[in-house]
Amino acid sequence: MKKILLSITFVFATTAVFAQVNEKELLQKNEEAEKKSKEEKPNGWVKKGTFTFLANQATFNNWLAGGQSNISGNVGLNYDLNYKSDKWNWDNKIIAGYGLTKIKDQDMQKSDDRLVFNSLAGRKASGEWFYSLFFNFQTQFDSGIDLASGIKTSHFFSPAYFQFGPGMLWKKSDNLKVNIAPATSKLVIVHPHFTELGPSFGVEQGDSSRFEFGAAINGYYKFTIMENVTFENILNLYSNYLEDPQNVDIDYTLNVVMKINKYLTTNFAFQTIYDDNAFRGFQTRQVIGLGVNYGF
């Protein structure tokens, strides 16, 4: 009888010890998983930004092969202010850039000029889908000059673009998301003196604004292709139901950052725009250079 009691006691004690160990391991795993989940998807406000200065220079003296000395500089700001909770997502991004180029014996020219604000709010629907509402604003800082005629063609808030509308957001992460808005309003504003002699940026002669209603698709994908090399893709598509819906407006931007160290990077930016109301063809810009970065 004593042996049986001792055996039963030993079995219960061993089981209790193993159960306690398993319970501790399970609690530890749950705590680690919860901590990892919070790190990946923190609730509340998250903000981050990068200020970049790019510089390029080329100098030619008695160079028989030919060439013109030039110098250029660009400053840029990329700032994110995002909010997350169990049911809500609200992503805000500000993109600003301005650059100047000086070619020998020529006047100073702009090489970059843009101010963009994107805001996208979403309420959890199911899985990775959200009911969404988005707002987009774009303009420039400085005047644009036609080099052939010397005539001013644009300035701050002229043109100014506004887009807003409800839709559905598919969001895998902050680095991969697509928003579909089938009922989007678009407003283009220019100063009346740019439409005195003819249309400007899609606004008819004599008017100062143009209203459109259509569908918008906005995509964002950022990934690391190799160590210290990131690709950021931003795609905006828009179709105007009220006029030539088959002529889809396209705005695509590619930003490549090759990190050298904490403060130095090689940056490459490419953007192409197709908007047949403003210009019947593709507008493109390209910037590349050594960058000095400050993160905050």
Image (cartoon, helix red, strand yellow):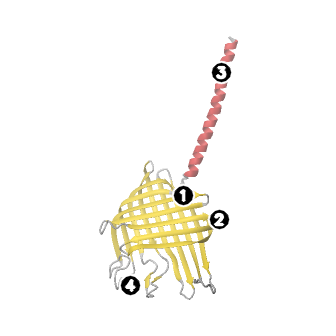
Disc 3/disc 2 C-alpha distance (Å): 61 Å
Q: Position of residue 170 (x, y in %)?
A: 44, 54
Which residue is identified by label 1?
223
Please tell me whether mark 4 or mark 2 is closer to you in this view.
2
Q: Is residue 167 above or below residue 103?
A: above
Q: Is residue 114 above or below residue 105?
A: above
Please tell me whether mark 3 or mark 2 is closer to you in this view.
2
Which secondary structure lies at badge 1?
strand
Q: Residue furthest top?
A: 1
Q: Is residue 158 left or right of residue 16?
A: left
Q: Is residue 63 left or right of residue 193?
A: right
Picture quadrant where residue 78 is located: bottom right
Q: Which mark is residue 11?
A: 3
Q: Position of residue 197 (x, y in %)?
A: 34, 85
Q: Amino acid at mark 4?
A: His
Relative depth, front residue between 231 and 132: 231
Query: Could you tell me which residue is drawn at 44 percent across and 56 percent down?
Result: 122
Q: Quadrant of the N terminus?
A: top right
Q: Is residue 279 left or right of residue 220?
A: left
Q: Position of residue 139 (x, y in %)?
A: 45, 74
Of marks 4 and 2, which one's residue comes earlier in the chain? 4
Which residue is identified by label 2?
260
Q: Amino acid at mark 3?
A: Val
